[in-house]
Image (spheres, rainbow, N blue to C red):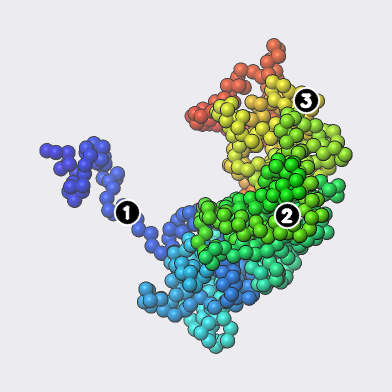
């Protein structure tokens, strides 16, 4: 008898092309047939795997939900059908977005008899008007998720539509209708109002909307949609003094990004007397680019630490940049170099983009019919043609801007050439002494250095992520605390070759910044900071990055650790608020102790800090950066051996095994030593 005939399910026999021993299951509990195939209907896939649609269930994902609804209103405004958008934060978990656009259609959908277009849009993935360029020329992408995903992840959603002479209302919960579409009072108004409450089953009971984040979101959408009024309203009970935002405000920027940049850089020293801004259409009516640019300096005329570069596509923040940023930077850099050649300044040939964008304050916003993003949450634009379109759009206006004001153009050229010369000098000098008020040595662009001369009392914070780095810059003591943001996980120097380490820009920049060399040529007299503090998020990724950095310091400069210079910061896990009293909590155990003790039977608001970037600057300062209130962990090594070796063979073996390529060593170490972990703070 053939092995194929031994299959219990005869219907599968004819499809079997491999030996029975490799294909059949051992018993009935392990059988696998058509009955095991699960078909998810409606919005069930969203609730089962929310990370596939909004990137996760953390604080960032929570705040992505209102963006999806606001973007629909913004699309109405950009298309010319809406002039006002209202963002109303009702309570910590409920938000309402209203626009005066055309209103979502409420007539019966031709493909779904008995269902209105409103119900189809809010309960069906990949539905909406953004697939049809006759309805929207540009929008936040063609993923077709938006409103339906928000509905799926909300415990309640109420849609109120004003159109066709009446007000229409329908309610939903977790992606399913809980009422029929109801025609209400007669009205001459038109528009859409969506109110929703985030679902604790998906995001947890501690998940809340942060007013400061929604406020900034509303402001950004306003300046990216010139001429649109965006009203902000917030329940006053949600606001605290440290937020420094109003309960009610109207944002209106008739000149878009140019008005906003002028507001952001008002009273700050800058080279350009007027902001370089404009808007140019792309070829074939495929979209347009808007921009605003200036160059900031400090009080002494040097590059300022207050600069920023923000980019957007169809009003969506592209945090990781993309092709529109590349085209913008190329046009500005080439324009300055071309002007240098025109005035016969040979030093202009040394200029690169890094020099030009060292201290810019700039915004570039593109609107495009068919944007392509890397990732569902649209954080990096990838259309290759947009780089060319953007560069071509800016080239002539920028060159004309420079030619129209030679005095300003010459000052800008000299400023950028000085930065280029400093960069070149930095590459030529391996060990860099601390800058002083009268002698400014050029350091990596990302470093926000401190101003104090000498190392006593100075600290270098190595921070996880650009966002957290920006917050840390605002929270720091500028005189004694320097900030160096890192982008993502650093190289594991233990398990990688010397060649890969040599090619790693970030780690080699750290060596230069610290200044004392490496294990072979260590000179502590050249150390630029008294403390080196690794500051990462209080999560698994943050711990991983901290481990990689500790391995780097152990391998490349163990003398830093022996000298007591290396520390780990201890950001809190939670903020617990009871009435007007707030406390920061460092562990789940401490949280439970407070909930069952001091605050038992009291109404509490518990905020979970997913990352350093979520904190307000004053919170980060109070909990993690101020020497008066923070806690640090000092990193130590076993004492050196009598023969002068850097450390014991046992330590080297442990580091090699824990940071090596074999996970079984790490697992064994954790299981054997977890019981000995105690309070490590110093």
Considering the image in quadrants, where does the N terminus appear?
A: top left
Mark 3 or 1, nearer chain start: 1
Which residue is identified by label 1?
37
Nearer to us of marks 3 and 2 is: 2
Q: Is residue 186 visible?
A: yes
User: Is the residue under label 1 in contact with that under label 3 (CB below 8 Å)?
Assistant: no
Q: Residue at x 44, y 64 (%)?
A: 126
Q: Position of residue 474 (x, y in %)?
A: 76, 50
| Disc 3 to disc 2, C-alpha distance | 37 Å
Crowding at mark 1 (Cα within 10 Å: few <14, some 14-19, many 20+): few
Please give the residue where the numbered disc 2 appears in the rendered image.
Answer: 361
Secondary structure of the residue carrying numbered label 1: loop
Estimate the x, y position of residue 72 in percent, counting from the top left.
55, 68
Crowding around mark 2 (Cα neighbors within 10 Å: few <14, some 14 to 19, many 20+) is many
Earlier in the chain: of badge 3 and badge 2, it is: 2
Q: Which quadrant holds residue 504?
A: top right
Rounded to the nearest whole Å, what is the CA distance between mark 1 and mark 2?
Answer: 54 Å
x and y percentages locating residue 287 in the rendered image: 56, 64
* Residue topped by disc 3: 524
Position of 262 relative to 435 (above/below):
below
């Amino acid at each position: 008898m053939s092995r194929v005939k031994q299959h219990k399910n005869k219907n599968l026999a004819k499809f079997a092309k491999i030996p029975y021993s490799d294909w059949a299951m051992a018993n009935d509990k392990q059988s696998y047939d058509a009955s095991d195939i699960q078909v998810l209907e409606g919005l069930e896939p969203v609730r089962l795997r929310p990370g596939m649609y909004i990137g996760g269930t953390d604080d960032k994902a929570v705040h992505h939900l209102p963006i999806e609804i606001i973007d629909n209103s913004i699309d109405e405004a950009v298309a010319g059908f809406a002039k006002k958008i209202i963002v109303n934060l009702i309570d910590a978990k409920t938000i309402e977005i209203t626009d005066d656009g055309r209103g979502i259609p409420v007539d019966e959908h031709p493909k779904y008899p008995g269902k209105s277009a409103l119900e189809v849009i809010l309960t069906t993935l990949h539905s909406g008007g953004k697939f049809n360029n006759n309805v929207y020329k540009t929008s936040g992408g063609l993923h077709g998720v938006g409103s339906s995903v928000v509905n799926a992840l909300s415990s309640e959603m109420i849609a109120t539509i004003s159109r066709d002479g009446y007000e229409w209302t329908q309610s939903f919960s977790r992606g399913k209708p809980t009422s029929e579409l109801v025609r209400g009072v007669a009205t001459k108004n038109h528009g859409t109002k969506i109110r929703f409450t985030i679902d604790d089953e998906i995001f947890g009971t501690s998940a809340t909307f942060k007013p400061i984040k929604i406020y900034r979101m509303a402001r950004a959408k306003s300046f990216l949609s010139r001429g649109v009024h965006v009203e902000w309203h917030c329940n006053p009970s949600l606001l605290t003094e440290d937020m420094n935002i109003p309960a009610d405000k109207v944002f209106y920027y008739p000149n878009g990004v140019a008005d906003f940049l002028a507001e952001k850089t008002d009273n700050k020293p800058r080279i350009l007397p007027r902001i370089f801004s404009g808007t140019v259409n792309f070829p074939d009516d495929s979209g347009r680019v808007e921009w605003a640019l200036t160059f900031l300096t400090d009080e002494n005329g040097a590059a300022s630490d207050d600069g920023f570069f923000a980019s957007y596509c169809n009003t969506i923040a592209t945090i990781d940049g993309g092709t529109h940023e590349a085209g913008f930077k190329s046009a500005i850099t080439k324009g300055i170099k071309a002007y240098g050649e025109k005035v016969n300044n040979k030093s202009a040939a040394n200029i690169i983009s890094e020099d030009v964008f060292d201290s810019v304050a700039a915004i570039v916003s593109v609107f495009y019919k068919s944007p392509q993003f890397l990732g569902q949450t649209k954080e990096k634009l990838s259309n290759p043609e947009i780089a060319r379109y953007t560069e071509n759009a800016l080239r002539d206006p920028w060159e004309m801007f420079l030619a129209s004001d030679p005095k300003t153009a010459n000052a800008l050229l000299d400023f950028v050439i000085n930065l280029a010369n400093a960069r070149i000098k930095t590459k030529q000098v391996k060990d860099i002494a601390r800058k002083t008020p009268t002698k400014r040595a050029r350091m990596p662009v990302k470093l926000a250095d401190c101003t104090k001369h000498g190392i006593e009392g100075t600290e270098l914070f190595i921070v996880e992520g650009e966002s957290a780095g920006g917050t840390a810059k605002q929270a720091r003591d500028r005189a004694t605390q320097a900030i160096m943001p890192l982008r993502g996980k650093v190289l594991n120097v233990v398990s990688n070759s010397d060649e890969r380490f040599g090619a790693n820009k970030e780690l080699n920049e750290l060596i230069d910044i610290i200044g004392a060399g490496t294990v072979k040529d260590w000179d502590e007299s050249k150390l630029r900071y008294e403390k080196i503090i690794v500051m990462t998020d209080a999560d698994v990724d943050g711990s991983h990055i901290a481990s990689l950095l500790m391995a780097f310091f152990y391998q490349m400069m163990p003398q830093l650790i022996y000298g007591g210079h290396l520390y780990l910061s201890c950001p809190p896990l939670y903020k617990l608020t009871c009435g007007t009293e707030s406390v920061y909590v460092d562990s789940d155990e401490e949280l439970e102790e407070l909930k069952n003790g001091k605050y038992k039977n009291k109404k509490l608001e518990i905020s979970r800090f997913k990352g350093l970037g979520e904190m307000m600057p004053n919170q980060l300062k109070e909990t993690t950066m101020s020497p008066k209130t923070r806690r640090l962990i000092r990193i130590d090594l076993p004492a050196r051996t009598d023969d002068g070796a850097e450390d014991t063979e046992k330590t080297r073996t442990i580091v090699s095994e824990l940071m090596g390529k074999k996970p079984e060593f790490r697992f064994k170490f954790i299981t054997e030593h977890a019981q000995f972990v105690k309070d490590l703070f110093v």
